Image (cartoon, grey):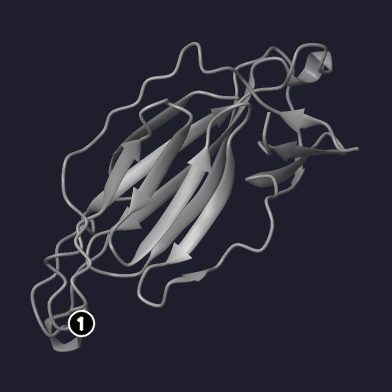
Amino acid sequence: VMPHFLSSLTSAALLILSGTSAADGGDWLVDGAPYVATAAISDDAKRVDLDNGLLRRSIVLLPNAATVAFDNLMTGQSELRSVRPEATVTINGVAYSVGGLEGQPIHNGRTAERFPWRPRSEWLSRPATWPAPGVSLAIDFRPPEGAPQDLRGVTVTVHYELFDAMPLLSKWISITNEGAAPITLDAF
């Protein structure tokens, strides 16, 4: 059994951004305006949904973060076949699951520019906004009690961005080491 990175929701902060996700059957390539990305937490605070009317990713938060639904709303088809960890990292030669149904704080907000981009008008049918509008969600995972000393202070953050007006979701991880010992990231 692979050890897990996890944490509790006790220090969770969730900012819900307003907007509506309206799938009216129109063609998102012709008019993407109705497809505004949202991040919404369930009434019982146990799930967060990223939804833009084209795609929906549902992540349970308790007892640990895990994607439990990833749906293509244009076809009605589920893209998720099984629940797995949100990421896997190998630190100092040991593989760890990140998430996977065991608790952690979450943070979300608007998408942000991660690299410089200059629109090329000859490639676009209409003016482009940068960064692409949408919502973002970041979930922090920490080692459990009893984890090796060299992992104390290590946080693995799984980032998601869902964009307005297109069936596109971005996902990446970042690792922060605020502990006293250096670590080696062998794989992710």
For label 1, the residue is 27
Q: Toward which corner of the image does residue 30 lie, by quadrant?
A: bottom left
Residue neighbourhood size for the residue with mark 1, other residues' Cα within 10 Å, grouped as few (<14), some (14–19), many (≥20): few
Residue at 40% over, 57% down: 56
| Above/below status of 118 relative to 85 | below
Q: Is residue 111 visible?
A: no
| Above/below status of 30 relative to 16 | below
Q: Is residue 98 visible?
A: yes
Hey, what amino acid is under mark 1?
Asp
Q: Toward which corner of the image does residue 164 lie, by quadrant?
A: bottom left
Counting labels gives 1
**126 lies left or right of 138:** left
Quadrant occupied by the N terminus: top right
Residue at 42% over, 38% down: 48
Residue at 22% over, 56% down: 21
Can you name the residue that lies furthest to the right here? 1
**16 lies left or right of 125:** right
The image shows residue 88 at horizontal and vertical percentages of: 72, 45
Residue at 50% over, 33% down: 139
The image shows residue 185 at horizontal and vertical percentages of: 73, 40
The image shows residue 3 at horizontal and vertical percentages of: 83, 31
The image shows residue 121 at horizontal and vertical percentages of: 12, 81
| Above/below status of 17 relative to 154 | below
Identify the element where label 1 is drawn.
Answer: loop
Residue placed most toward the observer, 187 or 28: 28
**105 lies left or right of 161:** right
Can you name the residue that lies furthest to the bottom here? 122
Residue placed most toward the observer, 52 or 46: 46
